Amino acid sequence: MPEAQKHLLIVEDEAPLRAAIAEQLSDRGYRVEQAESGEIALQKLADFAFDVIITDLRLPGIDGSAVVEGAVERYPHIIAIVVTGYGTVKDAVEAIKRGAWDFVSKPFNMSRLLAKVRAMLRMAERRHDALSGPIGPAGPLPLLKFCEDSRLSGRLALRSGEESRWADFLGGELALAGGTPEVAGEDPLDLLLAMESGTYRIEQRRLDPEALRRSESRVVEERAPGEPSLPGFVPVPSGRLSMIRVRGQDIQVQTEGENRPEFTVTTVVAREGQVMRKVQSAWHHPFKRREDQEVARTQIDRQHDRVVAMLQGLSVEVGSPVPVPTAPAAALGVDPSLLAWAISFVAEQVRDS
């Protein structure tokens, strides 16, 4: 079914956020209904047939998990995506048990939510089948790109005679590669890309509530010691989350590391659930060696602490004395990109005031 005919329901008690999501989806041709509470959502579910429901978990009255359960009971194949706030991952686990397909954490990037909706719709069309066929004339590269664009959580497997290669993905990001026969000194991903003929198979892995529990470390300040990681993957160090107050406004700073396929550290600054700024740094290769974990952990901490410190410096009251540096900027370790970032942040505060 064309995307323009897909019917979506947005359930969110925060009117500005609900309207923003609805506007973005409507602009892309979806039919969109809105509900500000769980009760209204269940009423609309009784009146309309929906393909997708996006619901916040924390709602007045009937919560998001109950809305998901009611939606799945009426439409067994409906795609339910839940939105979680800080500290509500356990609630998201309950929603998964009740039939939700996926979740996003506040603050979220709107383009990422839209990509997730498209990916879930594509997955629904092939949820009972894996994709398979011959490797095309362009080789495996289009297959890797397809897995990334589709936000695949699963495996791409290639076979040609006695040669077998595979690549595992988490949310469209390459996590691990391997295969047989092994070639000393050669990267498994390079060997996969070198295959010119044969067959492929793409298998989608359904979301696992246990894996969702383990992902809780991505939205809390520190990971509990000894927490298990996803089987088959080298665990990326846990992220950081800080709440600070700048000029009377609550600002959320969240830093995470992920493979894209290179290891990338992303710091997002958000206010009232809306992403304002983003800082990124990246390695030249994926994170796949356990011995790199300490270095990656240091990079995540350094970037997070640097952005938090910069924002805290912006909270100086008007009229307060500002120290004048006596050394050149280079000697003080000033990052020019962060300086430009800070200037644009201040400009936005001025506009809002």
Image (cartoon, rainbow, N blue to C red):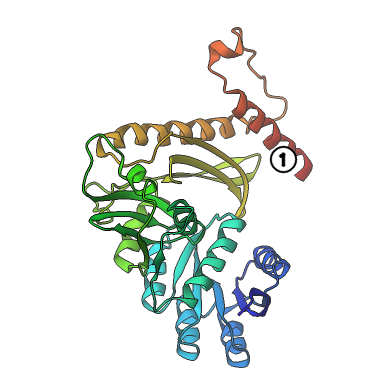
Q: Nearer the viewer, residue 108 or 323?
A: 108
**Tag 1: residue type?**
Gln
Q: Is residue 353 visible?
A: no
- Secondary structure beneath label 1: helix
Residue 130 at x, y = what percent? 38, 72
Left or right of 209 on screen, residue 29: right
Q: Residue at x 21, y 44 (%)?
A: 182
Which of 64/144 is in front? 144
Q: Is residue 44 visible?
A: yes
Above or below, 206 relative to 256: below
Residue occupying image coordinates x 68% and y 76%: 4
Residue at 76 percent across and 45 percent down: it is 352
Number of numbered callouts drawn? 1
Image quadrant assignment for residue 160: bottom left
Q: Is residue 101 left or right of residue 13?
A: left
Q: Which residue is mark 1?
A: 349
State the residue at coordinates (65%, 31%). 342
Q: Can you give x and y, in whole percent of width and height, for residue 237 in the image?
A: 34, 43
From what the image shows, is residue 99 above or below residue 44?
A: above
Q: Tell me: 221 left or right of 247.
A: left
Q: Quadrant of the N terminus?
A: bottom right
Quadrant of residue 185 within the rendered picture: top left
> Image height check: is 198 above or below 209?
above
Residue 204 at x, y percent in the picture: 38, 67
- Residue 281 at x, y percent in the picture: 50, 35
Query: For this view, does 155 lie left or right of residue 114?
Result: left
Image quadrant where one finds the C terminus: top right
